[in-house]
Image: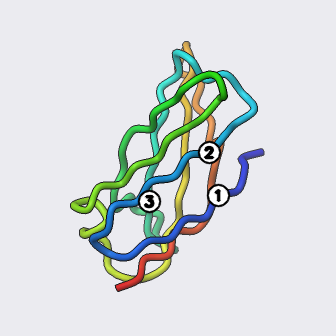
């Protein structure tokens, strides 16, 4: 089961967040996406950084990325892809965008 992570930011502001996970994701491909509700169409997406130790995942959204979203409520998810193309959602939640 994926962990819960909800995020929020002001439209056009940079957003940074670091989350510690209980899994060594070294060598994995890590991505995130913010998608519409209820249509689930991806609005923006990007890569995640990973450092160990500790097992920290870094999420950074630029001013340009957050500026493309209209104020409202969206879905958020972070995904890892392991060797052999095994894909898992490891974080999911809500994204609130304000003016």
Q: Is residue 59 left or right of residue 71?
A: right
Q: Give coordinates of residue 58: x percent, y percent.
A: 50, 41
User: Where is residue 78 shown, x and y percent of the image?
Assistant: 54, 46
Q: State the quadrant of the N terminus.
A: top right
Above or below, comparing residue 21 to residue 35 in the picture:
above
Mark 2 residue crowding within 10 angstroms, few (<14) / some (14–19) / many (20+): few
Q: Residues within 10 Å of mark 1 (few under 14, many from 20)?
A: some
Q: Which residue is mark 3?
A: 34
Q: CA distance from mark 2 to mark 3?
A: 17 Å
Quarter of the image for residue 87 reads top right
- Select label 2 or label 1 by which is in front: 2
| Mark nearer the N terminus (2 vs 3) | 2
Left or right of 6? Residue 17 is: left
Q: Which residue is mark 1?
A: 5
Neighbours of disc 3 within 10 Å: few (<14), some (14-19), many (20+): many
SS of the residue under disc 1: loop
Label 2, on which residue?
19
Kindly report the distance in space between the C-alpha atoms of the residues bearing marks 2 and 1: 9 Å
User: Which badge, 2 or 1, comes first in the chain's sequence?
Assistant: 1
Q: Residue at x 29, y 55 (%)?
A: 62
Residue 48 against residue 35 in the figure, above or below: above
Label 2 SS: strand
Pick out the residue farthest to the front: 53
- In the picture provided, is 76 more to the left or to the right than 3? left
């Amino acid at each position: 089961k994926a962990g819960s992570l909800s995020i929020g930011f002001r439209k056009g502001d940079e957003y940074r967040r670091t989350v510690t996970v209980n899994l060594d994701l070294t060598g994995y491909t890590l991505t995130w996406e913010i998608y519409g509700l209820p249509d689930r169409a991806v609005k923006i997406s990007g890569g995640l950084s990973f450092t160990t130790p500790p097992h920290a995942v870094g999420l950074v959204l630029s001013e340009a990325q957050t500026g493309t979203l209209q104020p409202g409520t969206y879905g958020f998810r972070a995904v890892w892809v392991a060797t052999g193309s095994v894909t898992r959602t490891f974080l999911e939640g809500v994204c609130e965008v304000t003016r």
